[in-house]
Amino acid sequence: MWSLGNITHSIDAWLNESFNPALALLIEFVIVGTMAIELFAVLGLVLVFMERKVSAYMQIRVGPNRVGPKGMFQTFADTIKLLLKEGLTPSGSDKFLFNLAPVIAIIAAMLLLAPIAFAKDFQMWDLNIGVLYVSAISSVAVISILMAGWSSNNKYSLLGAMRSGAQIVSYELSAGLSILAIVVLVGSLKMTDIVASQETGWWLFKGHIPALIAFATFIIAATAETNRAPFDLAEAESELTAGFHTEYSGMRFALFFLAEYVNIFIVCAIGATLFLGGWMPFHIGQWEAFNHVMDFIPSSLWFFGKTFFLIFLIMWFRWTFPRLRIDQLLNLEWKYLLPISMFNLLLATAIAIFGWHF
Amino acid sequence: MLEEVSAIDQGDMIINIGPQHPSTHGVLQLVVTLNGETIKKVEPHLGFIHRSIEKMCESLTYRQFIYVTSRMDYLSSHINNHGCALCVEKGMQIEIPERAKVIRVLMDELTRIASHELWWGAMAMDLGAFTPFFLSFRERETITDIMEDTCGARLTMNYIVPGGVMVDLHPDFQRKVKAFIKLFREKADQYNELVTGNIIFQSRMKNVGVLSKEDAISYGCTGPTARGSGVNCDIRKLYPYEIYDQLKFDEVIETGCDSFSRYLVRVKEMYQSISIIEQLIDNIPEGDFQAKTKAVLKLPKGEFYTRVETARGELGVYIVSEGATTPYRIKFRSPGFSNLSALNHMAKGGKIGDLVAMMGTLDLVIPDIDR
C-alpha cells in the first residue's frame, strides 16, 4: 500500500548515501524542523478560520466572507495586521518575563508535535514514552500563562493566571488518568504501539465501558486544559476582559492565540490516537473485505479526519455552553472527574488483566 | 479613603471593573474589594454618562421634553414617553381616545418584549455563552422593524405624545405583529431548552445573589428584580393605567429570591406580554389616534406624579408646574438606580463570576441610572 512512509524512507536512504551519517541527520533535522514550523502556521490559519466559520454557522451569521473566496484568506490578513501592530510593553511590567511568556507558550506547543503520528510511518520522533512525554510537556504551558499573568502587572491578568494555574493543574490529573486507562489496555506508552493495537478496532469500541468513560473524561479534561469554553476562566471575557493576555498586543498576543489553537489540535490528535485509532482506518474484527476497502483511504486522511472531528466537538462546546464558576470548576474535577477516572483506571486494569476486551 | 487603605493592609485587592468593561453594559464603574476571588465590597461609581436630562427638560415645553426621555432608558423608550405623556395628560386633564390607549399598550408590550429579548441575550453572554445573544437579536430585529414602520426610528423611538400617539398605525402593523407572535412562540421554547434548562446555567444562577423580600423592599427595588424576591409590585396591576385593568394577564412573581428567579420572572413576563398583545391585536378600536389638544400646553400650577411599569421596573414622573409652558422642576424616579443600590448587598461573599451574573439579572441600563 502506498504511504507517506515510502517517501520519508527514500529521502532518508538517499541522504545517507550522498552524505556522511552525521551530516545526513543534520539535514533531516532541518527538514523536519521547517516542516514543523510550516505545519504550525498552517494549523493556526486553518483552525482560526474553522472556528470563525463554525461559530458563524451556529450563530446564524455568515462569518468572514470578504478576503478571498468565502473569506478563506481572512486569517492571512489578520496575521499581517498583527505582525504590523505595535507590541506594547506596559511600563510597570517585568519586561523579561513579559516577553518570554508567549515564547514559552509557543515552544511548549511546538514540542508537543514531536510524538504525534500523522500518518503511517510519518512521525517526527517515535519515542518509547510518547504519551508520558505529551502529558509532561503539556504542563509546561501553564508556566507561560502564570508568567504572563504575573509579569503584566495587571490585576485582571493576575486573576486569570491564578485561575488558569488551579485549573490546569487539576485537570491534568484526570486527563492523565484517562490516558492511562488506554495505556493499561495497550501495555505500552509508545504511539506506534498504541496505534498498532487498534488494527482490529478502535479502543473506543473494543475497550468496553472503561474506554467510553475515559473518552468522556478525556474530552472534558482536554477542553479544560486548553482553556476553552465552558472552562475558559483564564480568559473569561465577560469577567476579566481578556484574562492573562489583557496586556498583550500585536505579535505577542498572536503567539498566545496560535499556541491555543495548536494546543487544541494536539489534544485532539492525542485523543484521536488513543481512542479513535490515530491513522488506523476503521476496521471491524474479521471482516477482511470491509477492512481492505477501508485501507484504500490514505492514513493521513483518517488521522486528520478524526482529529478535526474532535476539534469540531470542542468548538461546538464553546459556542453552546455558558462558563462555569471557578469553585464549580474545581468541584467538578476533584469531586466527580478524579474519583471516576481513578475507579475507571481500576476497571480498565481488571479488563486488561483478564483479557475481557475484544 | 481610610477604609480602602486598611483593606489593602489586610492583603485584599481592589479592582476597578469598568467604566470600560464588557459586562457592565455601559459606562458604569464598580470598585470591587476582593479577597482572592471572593467579593468583600462593591461600590458603584456613577456619573460617566450624566447628561442632566432633568435640567434639560425644564427648559423645554411640555410637548418637547418627552423626546429627551427616550434617551434615558433607551431600551424602553416608548414606555418612558408613555409615563411623561400620562403625567402631562393628568395635569391638563386630557381624555385620550380608546384607539390611542390600545395602541399605547401594544407599543409598551412590544417594547417590553424587545427589551427582555436583549436582556436575555446579554445575560447569557455575561455567563460566557455567546450564541444566545445572536439568537435573541433575530427576534428583537422583527420588533425593531415594526417600530421602524410605526415611528421611523429603531432605537430612540418617539411615538407617544400628550393626547394620544403621534401618527396612526402603519397598515402593515397587524400582519407583522402576528408574524412576530408566531415566530416568538416557535423559538422561545427552543431558547428555554438551550439556556434555561442548561445545568451549567442553573448552577451559576441558583442560590446566587440572594435578595430577600425585606431587603428588596428596603432598597426600593422594583420591576422583575423585586418580583424575583416575591414582592408584589407590578404597576400595571397595582395602579392600572390606560386599559390594563381590562386585560387578562398575570403578575409574574417568583419566591426564590436568587438570580435564577429574577431570570425566570423576565422570561415569563415575555409570555405574558405576548398574551396581552394577542388579546389586543385583533381588537384595535376605530377612531381618532389623538385627542384634540391646544397648540401650546400649559399645566396648571401644582405637582403631578404618574408612574408606569417599564421593562426594568417602576418609572415615576414628577412634574412641578408654575403654570408656565415649561415645567418648573422635573424628577424621574428611575428603576435602575434603586436596583443597582442592592448590588453591594447581593454580591458580598460571591465570586467575580457571580457579580457579573448578578449585574445581568438586575438588567442595568446605565443611561437610565445616570440620566
Image: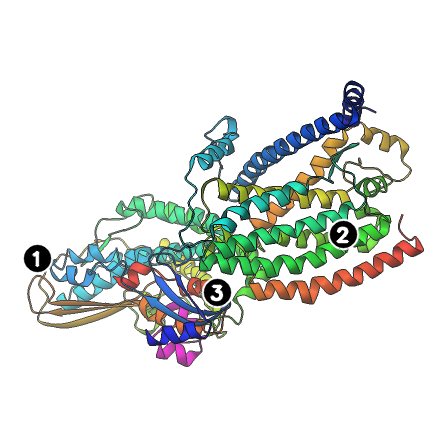
Q: Chain of mark 2?
A: A
The three-letter code of the residue at mark 1 reads Val
Colour scheme in use: rainbow
Residue A187: x %, y % from top left: 87, 49
- Callout 1: SS: loop
Judged by depth in the image, the label closer to the viewer, 1 or 3, is: 3
Q: Chain of mark 1?
A: B
Q: Quadrant of residue B104?
A: bottom left
Up the image or down, A275 lies above or below A35; here it is below
Dot label at residue B352? 3
Which residue position holds label 2? A179
Q: Which contiguous range is marked in magenta?
A: B211-231
Which residue position holds label 1? B296
How many numbered dots are placed on residues in this image? 3
The three-letter code of the residue at mark 2 reads Ile
Judged by depth in the image, the label closer to the viewer, 2 or 1, is: 2
In the image, what residue occupies the spot 57% across and 51% down? Answer: A144
Res. A32 in view: yes
